[in-house]
């Protein structure tokens, strides 16, 4: 797997700015190799006809939607859900169910607040694991109805 591609996946999955040191750790590479791969990614996105871009912010590097698409995002993303919360919801839906500690490792500590928001909005159910100290998170029927996603049958018919 190409390092730049792996870093692209890391930036996408984390959904928040990451420092060069964090990226190198997640990618299992040296800081120098990670920096070179990030520069390659930035260059690739600059010449690609893509809605996404890799940018350096005050807090680190981030994969994000180009600002030219902000109006489109405002139309498509539910007003009550921010980008980070929506990404956290997507991670929960993809793993459904997922242990909260695994989600926090994947999305960062800001996910605690996002999970609480998703529970309050009724998109996620949170229940204590029977034999663990963490919570099990899963999407609700409201999630499926709101996003018009067919619920997969739990039985293997």
Image: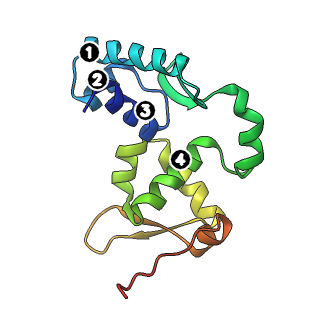
Q: Quadrant of residue 131?
A: bottom left
- Percent coordinates x, y for residue 139 in the rendering: 51, 67
Of circles 1 and 2, which is in front?
A: 1
User: Observer-nearest residue: 5 or 147?
Assistant: 5
Q: Quadrant of residue 3?
A: top left
Q: CA distance from mark 4 to mark 3?
A: 12 Å
Can you identify the residue that label 2 sits on?
24
Q: Residue at x 65, y 44 (%)?
A: 82
Q: Residue furthest bottom?
A: 157
Question: Quick check: can you spot residue 55?
Answer: no
Q: Is residue 118 above or below residue 108?
A: below
- Percent coordinates x, y for residue 97 in the rendering: 40, 66
Q: CA distance from mark 3 to mark 1?
A: 16 Å
Check disc 1 and report its element: helix, strand or loop.
helix
Can you identify the residue that label 1 sits on?
33
User: Observer-nearest residue: 82 or 55?
Assistant: 55
Check disc 2 and report its element: helix, strand or loop.
helix
Can you identify the residue that label 3 sits on?
11
- Percent coordinates x, y for residue 15 in the rendering: 49, 37
Q: CA distance from mark 4 to mark 2?
A: 22 Å
Q: CA distance from mark 3 to mark 2?
A: 11 Å
Q: Earlier in the sequence, mark 4 or mark 2?
A: 2
**Residues packed near mark 2 inside 10 Å, few (<14), some (14 to 19) or many (20 plus):** many
CB under 8 Å between discs 1 and 2: yes
Q: Tell me the number on the disc at residue 87.
A: 4
Q: Is residue 93 above or below residue 112?
A: below
Asked if residue 59 lies left or right of residue 103, the reply is right
Question: Quick check: can you spot residue 12?
Answer: yes
Q: Quadrant of the C terminus?
A: bottom left
Q: Quadrant of the N terminus?
A: top left
Q: Earlier in the sequence, mark 1 or mark 4?
A: 1
User: Observer-nearest residue: 131 or 54?
Assistant: 54
């Amino acid at each position: 797997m190409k390092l730049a591609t792996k870093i692209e996946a890391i930036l996408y999955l984390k959904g928040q700015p990451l420092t060069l040191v964090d990226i190198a750790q997640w990618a299992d590479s040296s800081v120098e190799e990670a920096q070179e791969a990030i520069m390659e990614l930035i260059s690739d996105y600059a010449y690609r006809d893509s809605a996404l871009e890799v940018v350096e912010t005050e807090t680190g590097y981030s994969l994000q939607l180009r600002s030219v698409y902000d109006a489109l995002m405002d139309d498509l993303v539910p007003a009550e859900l921010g980008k980070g919360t929506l990404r956290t919801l997507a991670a929960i839906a993809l793993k459904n169910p997922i242990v909260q500690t695994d989600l926090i490792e994947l999305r960062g500590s800001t996910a605690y607040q996002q999970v609480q928001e998703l529970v309050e909005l009724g998109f996620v159910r949170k229940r204590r694991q029977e034999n663990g100290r963490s919570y099990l998170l899963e999407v609700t029927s409201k999630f499926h109805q709101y996003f018009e996603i067919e619920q997969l049958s739990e039985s293997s018919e």
